[in-house]
Amino acid sequence: MSERKRAMLARRTAAQTHSTEGLSCPRELRTPCVVWDWLSVDEATDVERKGMNSPFVIRAWRRWQDERRSYAERVGLGEAAACGPTGRPTLQRSDLR
């Protein structure tokens, strides 16, 4: 059996285990990155002044991405399989319904 096929079977097994155990990706990792949730107080002040032009927007997005990757590794799945597709970061909280 090829290495690729072995990896695909391992992911499928992990996905089946993941779904049967009832594990669920945290809500804040399933939805697009809401920058405000990933900022410190000082960073939030800069983002309030500069909006999406602040360098802290990218840093917050990277923290969110790192957390998604970390979660996916813990459950043994790919990132999209564990938490769904990604999107661009947003400043609007209305995306969390």
Image (cartoon, grey):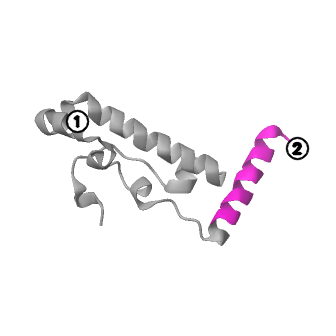
Amino acid type at circle 1 is Asp
The image position of residue 49, as x and y in percent, is: 11, 35
* Secondary element at tag 1: helix
Residue 12: say if magenta. Answer: yes
Please provide the residue range marked out in magenta: 1-18
- The C terminus appears in which quarter of the rendering? bottom left
- Residue 97 in view in this figure: yes
The residue wearing badge 2 is: 1
Q: Earlier in the sequence, mark 2 or mark 1?
A: 2
The image position of residue 37, as x and y in percent, is: 31, 50
Q: Disc 2 versus disc 1: distance between alpha carbons? A: 53 Å
- The N terminus appears in which quarter of the rendering? top right
Q: Quadrant of residue 51?
A: top left
- Residue 77 in view in this figure: no
**Disc 1 packing (10 Å; few <14; some 14–19; many ≥20):** few
* Secondary element at tag 2: loop
> 50 or 4: nearer the eye?
50
Q: Quadrant of residue 69?
A: top right
The image position of residue 2, as x and y in percent, is: 84, 40
Q: Quadrant of residue 44?
A: top left
Cβ–Cβ under 8 Å for marks 2 and 1? no
The residue wearing badge 1 is: 42
Kindly identify the residue that appears in the image at 76 percent across and 52 percent down. 10
